[in-house]
Image (spheres, rainbow, N blue to C red):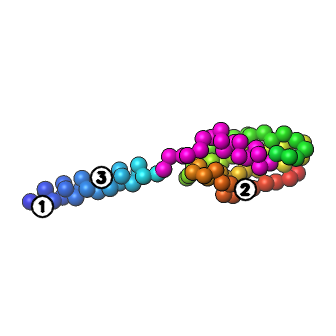
Amino acid sequence: MKKVSFIILIVFIMFIVSACENNSASPKITEEEAETIVMERHSGGIGEVKIKSVSHSSGEYIVEWEIDADCEFGTDYVDDQGGKIEKAEETNC
């Protein structure tokens, strides 16, 4: 009886763990849309916005960008569900 209870407990724990891993929502916006959001945010200056890299982690796109003419560069964190810029870091030379 103890073995059966132990096996049921292990199966139940494995079920809970696997359900938690699959619970993360898939992104509603694409990487390209995140790039466009960042480019629109920084457009209007002297130079062209260049996207250096885009990565996805913990529910947000991390977009690194630069504007050579203004000597600006930075990183914007774009929410992958609604496209809102959650945080931005910017540096000027």
The disc, 2 or 1, on the residue closer to the chain's N-terminal end is 1
Q: Residues within 10 Å of mark 2 (few under 14, many from 20)?
A: some
Q: Is residue 65 visible?
A: no
Q: Secondary structure at mark 3?
A: helix
Kindly report the secondary structure that dominates the magenta region of the rendered protein: helix
Report the magenta residues as a range.
25-42
Identified by mark 3, the residue type is Phe
Dot 2 corresponds to which residue? 88
Identified by mark 1, the residue type is Lys
> Horizontal placement of 39 versus 21: left or right?
right
Quadrant in which residue 47 is drawn:
top right
User: Is residue 3 magenta-colored?
Assistant: no
User: Is residue 38 magenta-colored?
Assistant: yes
Label disc, if present, on residue 2 of the rendered structure: 1
| Residue at 88% from the left image edge and 51% from the top image edge | 93
Contact between marks 2 and 1 (CB within 8 A): the answer is: no
Q: CA distance from mark 3 to mark 2?
A: 39 Å
* Mark nearer the viewer, 3 or 1: 3
Contact between marks 3 and 2 (CB within 8 A): the answer is: no
> Horizontal placement of 34 versus 57: left or right?
right
| Residue at 42% from the left image edge and 52% from the top image edge | 23
46 and 6: which is toward the camera: 46
